Image: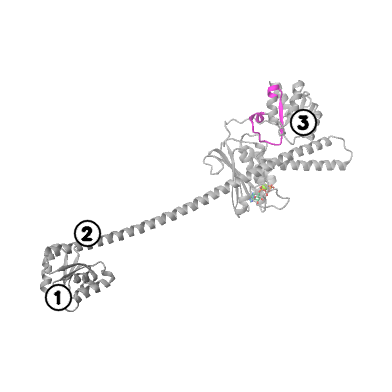
């Protein structure tokens, strides 16, 4: 119903003349006037039409006005219907009270004053219209509330879904961080272990070196000596891989031409893989040089090739390729930039998801005892990361595996001259007085003994402090070889002190660690533990060449 629509007004009277007179009086209101000549007819009309106001004559033959009003009021649908009684006869106060008790809203006595009747009916018709309008607005409001509630519920559900997604993303990120932290602490542990082991191996290998140089008549003793040497060498190789995984191996990066390096390995690879495996190489023309330690890269390629061989027991194809990549790397740990991507692909067994996930963890292997240490991929990964690059492995069961190695393009295209270990030239070597600083007495002693064998003189001290004391009083020292990790003063700190005391004095750092926090240490000549007399002689030769050059 709208605010201007006419409403229905029911006029009930048994006398047609009176009905007519009401009609005339109310016509001007502009509402619909419906007439009923009896109570029964009135009920019929009320049930059929939507009545706003009913005008009832109190005295009627079949059903009197009060009875009709009571019946209307009893019906729940007509509670809001306004009833006005009209009566010429019953007009006492008591009658009026009775009328109100029967649900009347008003009581008009005869003779009816037309203006009064009109005014009264108009008020109740208006009331009816307003009530209907209010109901309509109410329903509209309810509908809107419902709509809003539904929209809110939908937004809520979306929010919950997003929260769930975010939580899942966060959990995945946390898991990744956790994995990285795990690898980091594993790396630290392994690095520390390898460092200590290198010191032990230094003692073992040095002692064996010394014994090997003694005349031994017992062939059995000679045999065992060789066996001991081999085991110690294997131990040294193992610690190298551990350090590689821990990203603490001594790297000598230089600009490397990947194609040349791979070509140089082709024959050796074919021999290692056997005739059933076909090797293909595919390199971009004029590939940029990369910055990497060439020896370690060769070792990494060999590691990958051997993994491929193990995955292709019945033969297959091994493809080594490289191409330039600029821009986004797609590797989470590798910034966008300029790289060469090397791929080693095989047509072997491939890996299932669980193996693929763990394959580059140290000591993870699916090979039988004695056939794999599980350090291959982890050391390759270590090399890539320590060289500023990254590693990605993809694999499909039954199809094969691809390992991607990313290395940064070398700054400056010129190929640096490779610093080869200088040959030992005993004859031309001057005789030095070398101060050996090491808190491990056995290592210090062995170094001294190697120096003496090479024709040099040496003095051994157990700490940086005592080394400085010696240098203050003894000006005849020509060089210092110092351990890096010592309790009170590190080798790097000692080198710094020496550079103030005697700037021209060469200092060599001997260590099983590549992880130096300060830059002084980075620039010093270095001896990697375990070292033998050959390495010692070579580094002293480079010192000799430097002093000639300067
Ligand atoms: N090309 C490959 N195809 C299928 N599986 C591979 C491949 N490369 C590595 N894997 C899986 O990953 C594991 C770990 O490889 P990783 O090179 O680290 O150790 P390993 O080969 O088992 O032992 P190690 O290299 O120390 O002798 C392997 O045991 C193997 O299950
Ligand atoms: Mg391997």
Q: Quadrant of residue 541?
A: top right
Residue extending furthest toward the front: 93
- Per the image, the residue denoted by label 2 is 3
Tell me residue 15's x, y (percent): 12, 75
Where are the magenta residues, as a range?
Answer: 498-523
Tell me residue 493's x, y (percent): 68, 29
What is the C-alpha distance between the residues marked 2 and 1?
33 Å
Q: Which quadrant is the N terminus positioned in?
A: bottom left
Q: Quadrant of residue 262?
A: top right
Is residue 301 visible in this depiction of the protein?
no
Query: Considering only vertical position in the picture, is 530 above or below 69?
Result: above
Secondary element under disc 2, as helix, strand or loop, is loop
The residue carrying pointer 3 sits among few (fewer than 14), some (14 to 19) or many (20 or more) residues within 10 Å by Cα, namely some
What is the C-alpha distance between the residues marked 3 and 1?
135 Å
Q: Which quadrant is the C terminus positioned in?
A: top right
- Per the image, the residue denoted by label 3 is 462
Determine which of the numbered discs, if any, sits on residue 14 in the image. 1
Which dot, 2 or 1, sits closer to the camera?
1
């Amino acid at each position: 119903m709208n605010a201007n629509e006419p409403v229905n007004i029911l006029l009930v009277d048994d006398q047609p003349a009176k009905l007519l007179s009401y009609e005339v009086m109310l016509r001007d209101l502009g509402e619909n006037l419906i007439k009923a000549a009896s109570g029964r007819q009135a009920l019929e009309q009320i049930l059929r039409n939507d009545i706003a106001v009913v005008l009832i004559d109190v005295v009627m033959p079949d059903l009197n006005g009060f009875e009709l009003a009571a019946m209307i009021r009893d019906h729940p649908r007509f509670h809001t219907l306004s009833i006005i009684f009209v009566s010429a006869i019953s007009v006492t106060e008591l009658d009026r009270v009775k009328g109100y008790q029967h649900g009347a809203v008003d009581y008009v006595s005869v003779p009816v004053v037309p203006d009064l009747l009109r005014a009264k009916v108009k008020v109740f018709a208006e009331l009816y219209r307003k009530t209907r309008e209010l109901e309509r607005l109410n329903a509209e409001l309810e509908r809107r509330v419902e709509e809003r509630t539904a929209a809110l519920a939908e937004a809520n559900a979306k929010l919950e879904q997003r929260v769930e997604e975010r939580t899942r993303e966060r959990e995945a990120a946390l898991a990744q961080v956790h994995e990285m932290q795990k690898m980091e602490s594993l790396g630290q542990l392994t690095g520390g272990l390898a460092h200590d082991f290198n010191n032990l191996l230094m003692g073992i290998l040095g002692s064996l070196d010394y014994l090997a140089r003694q005349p031994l008549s017992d062939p059995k003793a000679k045999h065992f000596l060789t066996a001991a040497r081999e085991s110690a060498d294997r131990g040294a190789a193992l610690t190298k891989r551990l350090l590689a995984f821990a990203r603490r191996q001594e790297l000598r990066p230089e600009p490397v031409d990947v194609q040349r390096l791979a070509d140089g390995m082709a024959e050796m690879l074919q021999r290692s893989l056997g005739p059933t495996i076909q090797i293909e190489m595919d390199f971009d023309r004029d590939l940029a040089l990369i910055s990497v330690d060439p020896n370690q890269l060769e070792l990494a390629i060999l590691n990958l090739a051997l993994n491929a061989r193990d995955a292709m027991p019945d033969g297959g194809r091994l493809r080594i390729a490289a191409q330039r990549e600029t821009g986004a790397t797609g590797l989470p740990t590798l910034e966008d930039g300029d790289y060469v991507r090397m791929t080693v692909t095989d047509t072997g067994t491939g890996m299932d998801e669980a193996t693929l996930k763990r394959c580059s963890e140290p000591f993870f292997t699916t090979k039988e005892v004695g056939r794999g240490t599980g350090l291959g991929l982890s050391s390759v990964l270590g090399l890539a990361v320590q060289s500023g690059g990254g590693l990605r492995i993809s694999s499909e069961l039954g199809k094969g595996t691809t390992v991607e190695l990313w290395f940064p393009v070398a700054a400056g295209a010129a190929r640096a001259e490779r610093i080869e270990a200088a040959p030992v030239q005993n004859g031309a070597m001057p005789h030095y007085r070398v101060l050996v600083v090491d808190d491990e007495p056995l290592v210090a002693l062995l170094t001294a003994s190697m120096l003496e064998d090479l024709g040099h003189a040496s003095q051994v001290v157990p700490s940086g402090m005592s080394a400085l004391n010696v240098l203050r009083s003894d000006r005849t020292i020509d060089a210092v070889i110092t351990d890096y990790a010592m309790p009170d003063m590190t080798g790097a700190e000692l080198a710094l002190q020496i550079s103030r005391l005697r700037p021209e004095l060469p200092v060599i750092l001997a260590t099983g660690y590549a992880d130096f926090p300060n830059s002084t240490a980075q620039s010093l000549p270095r001896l990697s533990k375990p070292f033998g007399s050959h390495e010692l002689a070579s580094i002293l030769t480079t010192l000799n060449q430097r002093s000639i050059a300067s």
